[in-house]
Image (cartoon, rainbow, N blue to C red):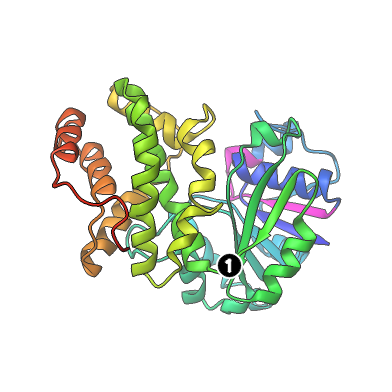
């Protein structure tokens, strides 16, 4: 199978390595002009995580990259998807391609799921899939296996991708709720920031409560958006908590920890924009998202972490399992 990978960051470079070295596909990786990540790969064939074999092709030419494959995997910042698609749509045969989205985010400016951004760009829903779930490149490249999920609007496409992407390193499950899979995957990054904040404050013991109440909050959000609330307890969300709320490799967790310590973090934490997007949607749908709101307030200096904890603990008592 020919595979094109749009994006060459941490996760994108792993997928390229996986598709070539594990799945033995014919892989081409694209990056924007003057992208230092791709320029470094062209020069050295490696980054901090993987070494590319000579069989992986590298290019700055988007038209060449799309024409290389029928399956286009996208792994870039969630907030850059619409901009990318504005260039993809200039390529005549883009509607013939299958697009697999590997980012975990919600568009901040519109509150759209990323698959919805592609649909608005003219891609048929039947040709869009998402690849989400737990896993860090640092573990996969040590050949530590994990489970992930592929979901789409098209059951036949989902089954085809699961069968062709699976290996002894990644066991893929067949998703059947693309709304829940996308929202759950994006929202877990928000909870990851919250977990990091607890670590930074010395309150790591509260992560158990964060996991339980966070999953319930996200389930309520997924249901309000038309998905299956049980997705919040699957691989896209709760199943990804270890990798996001506890792992030292988690960018979102590390960002939250350093934020409350007043220290800089210069890598992408998708949960920042996702928290903002979720609250915009929640306001439209009249949904209460107390944990997401608390994290947003801390990030935007509307409240101190100490005040947030006091406010959450002083909320009215309620049954743990009220109807979602």
Is 116 or 223 nearer to us in this picture? Answer: 223
Who's the residue at 54% across and 51% down the image? 76
For the question of whether residue 183 can be seen, the reply is yes
Query: Going by the image, does 110 lie left or right of 153?
Result: left
Where residue 67 sits, quadrant-wise, is bottom right
Quadrant housing residue 162: bottom right
Q: Which picture quadrant has residue 280?
A: bottom left
Classify residue 21 as left or right of residue 281.
right
Task: Give the answer, above or below, for where 37 lies relative to 25.
Answer: above
Residue pictured at 43% horizontal, 44% vertical: 189
| Classed neighbour count for the residue bearing mark 1: other residues with Cα under 10 Å, few (<14), some (14–19), many (≥20) | some
Residue 257 rendering spot, x and y as whole percentages: 36, 27
Question: For this rendering, which residue is in front, 59 or 282?
Answer: 282
Above/below status of 34 relative to 264: below
Residue 81 position within the rendered picture, expressed as x and y whole percent measured from the top left: 49, 59
Q: Residue at x 65, y 58 (%)?
A: 73
The residue under the point 61% across, 37% down is 136
Magenta residues span: 25-38
Q: Is residue 37 magenta?
A: yes
**Front residue of this view, candidates 310 and 42:** 310
Secondary structure under tag 1 reads helix
Can residue 256 be seen in this snapshot?
Answer: no
Q: Quadrant of the N terminus?
A: bottom right
The percent coordinates of residue 323 (x first, y second) are: 31, 63
Q: Which residue is mark 1?
A: 88
Q: Position of residue 274 (x, y in %)?
A: 37, 51
């Amino acid at each position: 199978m020919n595979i094109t990978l749009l994006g060459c960051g941490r996760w994108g470079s792993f997928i390229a390595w996986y598709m070539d070295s594990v799945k033995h596909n014919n892989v081409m990786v694209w990056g924007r002009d003057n992208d230092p990540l791709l320029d470094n790969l062209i020069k050295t064939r490696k980054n901090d995580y993987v070494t590319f074999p000579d069989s992986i092709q590298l290019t700055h030419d988007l038209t060449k990259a799309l024409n290389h494959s029928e399956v286009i995997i996208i792994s870039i910042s969630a907030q850059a998807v619409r901009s990318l698609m504005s260039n993809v749509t200039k390529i005549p045969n883009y509607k013939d391609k299958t697009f697999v989205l590997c980012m975990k985010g919600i568009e901040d400016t519109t509150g759209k799921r990323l698959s919805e951004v592609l649909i608005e760009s003219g891609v048929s829903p039947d040709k869009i899939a998402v690849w989400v779930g737990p896993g860090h490149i640092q573990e996969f490249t040590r050949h530590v296996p994990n489970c992930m999920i592929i979901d789409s609007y098209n059951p036949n496409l989902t089954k085809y991708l699961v069968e062709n992407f699976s290996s002894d390193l990644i066991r893929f499950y067949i998703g059947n709720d693309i709304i829940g899979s996308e929202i759950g995957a994006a929202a877990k990054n928000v909870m990851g920031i919250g977990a990091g904040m607890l670590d930074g404050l010395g309150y790591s013991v509260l992560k158990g409560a964060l996991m339980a109440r966070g999953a319930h909050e996200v389930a309520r959000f997924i249901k309000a958006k038309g998905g299956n609330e049980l997705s919040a307890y699957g691989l896209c969300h709760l199943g990804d908590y270890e990798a996001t709320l506890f792992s030292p490799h988690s960018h979102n967790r590390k960002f939250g920890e350093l934020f409350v310590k007043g220290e800089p973090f210069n890598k992408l934490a998708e949960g920042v924009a996702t928290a903002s997007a979720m609250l915009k949607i929640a306001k439209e749908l009249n949904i209460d998202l107390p944990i997401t709101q608390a994290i947003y307030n801390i990030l935007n200096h509307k409240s101190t972490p100490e005040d947030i904890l006091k406010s959450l603990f002083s909320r009215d008592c309620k049954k743990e399992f009220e109807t979602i």
